[in-house]
Amino acid sequence: MIQDMWKGMVNTPGTRQSKITGAYNHDVMNFFTFCLSFFLVERKFH
């Protein structure tokens, strides 16, 4: 759900991106979702 939101934000139809920029945005999205899920798990168990 969150990843779909980020994919919508990162991969907007109006922007033409190179493969490098697309890969970079994909890594940032994965890192952000990982941090967010880790934060939620930490809050749940502490």
Image (cartoon, rainbow, N blue to C red):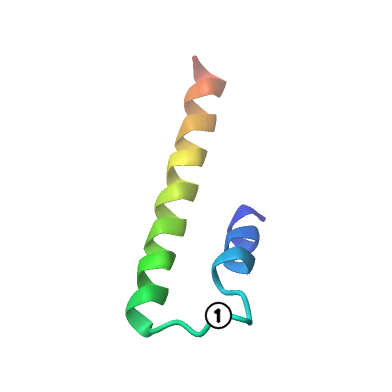
Residue farthest along the top direction in this orientation: 46
Extreme residue in the left direction: 20
Q: Residue at x 58, y 60 (%)?
A: 6
In this picture, is 34 found above or below 10?
Answer: above
Image quarter of residue 25: bottom left
Q: Classify the position of the N terminus by image quarter.
A: bottom right
User: Hey, what amino acid is under mark 1?
Assistant: Thr
| Drawn side of residue 21 relative to residue 32, left or right | left
**At which x and y percent is residue 11?**
56, 74
Up-down: is 40 above or below 2?
above
* Residue 23, percent from left and from top: 37, 73
The residue indicated by pointer 1 is 15
Residue shown at 47%/25% (left/top)? Answer: 42
Residue 26 occupies which quadrant of the picture? bottom left
From what the image shows, is residue 33 above or below residue 19?
above
Tell me residue 30's x, y (percent): 43, 57
> Residue placed at 54% from the left, 31% from the top?
40
Direction from residue 10 to residue 32 in the image, left or right: left
Badge 1 element: loop
User: Nearest the camera: 26 or 37?
Assistant: 26
Mark 1 crowd level (few <14, some 14–19, many ≥20, 10 Å Cα): few
